């Protein structure tokens, strides 16, 4: 696609000095992937060799490799630096090589054509420069490792022109033909499983001011966005010992890092895995897989293997919730720092609050009936929802004093009423003379041995939770 000359001054500091000296840039990057052999002049490395080069250059710049690979796919679908005749790939508009670097005279034009490592570093440095621009919108609170935060830098890599406006100004419809929309579609297709969708920006036409008949840059009126959709940090920054979960049902845990390898088991969605080491590239050098493979083990340590980075995300622990009873007016517990805590009551939305910097939360909920089910989740800094913790309101309220029917010296059956299903115990002094569980209406009937006139009979009710009532008494007539 046509890429437009960047504004004067934007690239004054971009001379491949961002990472290391120009003279060593290519050799340093190549050394990261030396397992694939030396890069031969005028020959395209294998697909996985290029995958390695792109991944390492992106990580060096702290850019999600998913973003870099999608840009290359959009710019150069075959991931080729050279054509079939060994000549550098140069587009009609002058875009050079793998990264299709266009109109960038500050770079060595011959090296852009003939040195794939140099071409990659130049393209990534330009992309990184787009991220540093202060005239482009960002996501509030998101850092460089969040893929969605690269939406506008990716746009700028091609040009912040009306053709790339996220919305069609006239209709307000999403501009599916915008460069960055195509790039982000590649990310969803090539770096994630089919179930994963990137978060969407809440765009309005008023966010972008431009003349659709002009080639002048878009003027961005909204410079910061808050997304409610889940946003996605790169899957390339996991370390040994990190806990992740599977994002899709029936994901393959393979014996080796390749889709050609045997699958030793199918993993259920949300299965917890532990990262065992650094990621690997596909064993098949010609494989078209852009993702990488992580060595993992199951949480019970019974299985080990490799799983695609496309099928895992960082594990979020359940919130811890303190016990609550039917006298409490607050629900408290712990979640992630500054997380939004959401509470459902009997599966219906009820309350929400924000945890503090230590993750502690306390929500006023009022007195709740014993047996009420409260389900607690939270959303972390990426708007990802945690697994749920459910607590049941504990019964700590004792039954009222039970009623007792008249007792005469000839009485053999005592009746009365109490809380439903509570157990009634009749005593004379410390001796139990009868006990019975009340029915669903709270009615009870207890057979006793006739007692002497003037004897005091004491009745207490104990509910299912073990709460005991105050005693009720009746004097035998």
Image: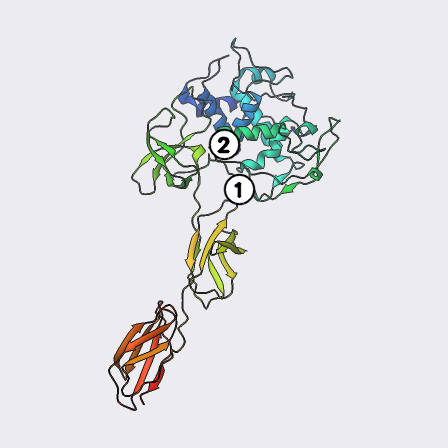
Q: Residue at x 53, y 38 (%)?
A: 146
Q: Along the polypeptide, which appears first: circle 2 or circle 1? A: 2
Q: Are marks 2 and 1 in contact (CB under 8 Å)?
A: no
Quarter of the view holding residue 140: top right
Task: Report helix, strand or loop for mark 1.
Answer: loop
Quarter of the view holding residue 131: top right
Q: CA distance from mark 2 to mark 1?
A: 23 Å
Q: Residue at x 52, y 46 (%)?
A: 381
| Nearer to me, 314 or 436 | 436
Whether residue 269 is visible:
yes
The reply, left or right, for residue 472 in relation to residue 8 is left
The reply, left or right, for residue 25 in relation to residue 418 is right
Q: Residue at x 57, y 28 (%)?
A: 183
Q: Please, is residue 78 above or below residue 60 in the view?
A: above
**On the image, numbered disc 2 is attached to which residue?**
59
| Nearer to me, 163 or 452 | 452
At which x and y percent is residue 155? Answer: 62, 30
Whether residue 17 is visible:
no
Q: In front: mark 2 or mark 1?
A: 1
Q: Please, is residue 138 above or below residue 217 in the view?
A: below
Name the quadrant of the C terminus: bottom left
The reply, left or right, for residue 353 in relation to residue 323 is right
Give residue 230's mark: 1
At which x and y percent is residue 310? Answer: 45, 33
| Nearer to me, 108 or 266 | 266
Task: Report helix, strand or loop for mark 2.
Answer: helix
Q: Please, is residue 446 above or below residue 26 in the view?
A: below
Within 10 Å of disc 2 (Cα), the crowding (few <14, some 14-19, many 20+) is some
């Amino acid at each position: 696609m046509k890429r437009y000359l960047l504004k004067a001054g934007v690239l004054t500091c971009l001379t491949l000095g961002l990472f290391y000296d120009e003279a060593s840039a290519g050799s340093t990057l190549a050394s990261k992937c030396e397992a694939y052999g030396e890069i031969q002049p005028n020959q395209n490395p294998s697909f996985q060799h290029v995958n390695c080069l792109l991944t390492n250059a992106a990580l060096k710049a702290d850019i999600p490799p998913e973003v870099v690979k999608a840009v290359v796919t959009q710019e150069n679908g075959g991931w080729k630096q050279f054509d079939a005749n060994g000549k550098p790939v140069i587009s009609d508009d002058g875009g050079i090589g793998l990264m299709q670097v266009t109109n960038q005279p500050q770079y060595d034009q011959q090296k852009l054509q003939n040195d794939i490592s140099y071409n990659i570093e130049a393209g990534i440095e330009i992309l990184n420069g787009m991220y540093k621009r202060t005239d482009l919108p960002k996501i509030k609170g998101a850092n460089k490792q969040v893929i969605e935060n690269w939406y506008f830098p990716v746009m700028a890599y091609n040009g912040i022109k009306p053709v790339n406006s996220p919305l069609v100004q006239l209709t307000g419809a999403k501009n599916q033909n915008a460069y960055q929309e195509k790039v982000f579609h590649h990310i969803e297709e090539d770096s994630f499983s089919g179930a994963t969708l990137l978060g969407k920006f809440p765009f309005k036409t008023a966010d972008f001011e431009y003349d659709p008949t002009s080639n002048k840059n878009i003027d961005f009126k909204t410079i910061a966005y808050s997304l409610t959709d889940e946003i996605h940090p790169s899957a390339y920054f996991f370390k040994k010992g990190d806990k992740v979960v599977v994002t899709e049902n029936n994901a393959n845990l393979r014996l080796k890092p390749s889709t050609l390898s045997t699958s030793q088991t199918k993993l259920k969605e949300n299965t917890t895995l532990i990262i065992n080491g650094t990621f690997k590239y596909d064993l098949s050098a010609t494989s078209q897989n852009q993702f990488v493979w992580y060595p993992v083990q199951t949480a019970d340590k019974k299985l080990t293997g490799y799983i695609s980075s496309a099928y895992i995300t960082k594990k979020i622990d359940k919130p811890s919730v303190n016990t609550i009873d039917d006298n409490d007016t607050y629900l408290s517990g712990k979640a992630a720092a500054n997380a939004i805590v959401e509470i459902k009551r009997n599966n219906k939305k009820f309350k929400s609050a924000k945890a503090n910097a230590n993750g502690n939360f306390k929500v006023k909920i009022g007195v709740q009936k014993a047996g009420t089910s409260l389900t607690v989740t939270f959303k972390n800094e990426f708007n990802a929802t945690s697994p749920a913790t459910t607590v049941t309101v504990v019964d700590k309220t004792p039954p009222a004093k039970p009623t007792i029917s008249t007792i005469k010296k000839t009485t053999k059956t005592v009746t009365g009423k109490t809380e439903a299903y509570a157990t009634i115990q009749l005593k004379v002094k410390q001796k139990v003379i009868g006990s019975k569980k009340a029915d669903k209406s709270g009615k009870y009937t207890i057979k006793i041995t006739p007692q002497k006139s003037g004897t005091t009979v004491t009745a207490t009710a104990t509910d299912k939770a073990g709460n005991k009532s105050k005693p009720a008494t009746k004097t035998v007539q």
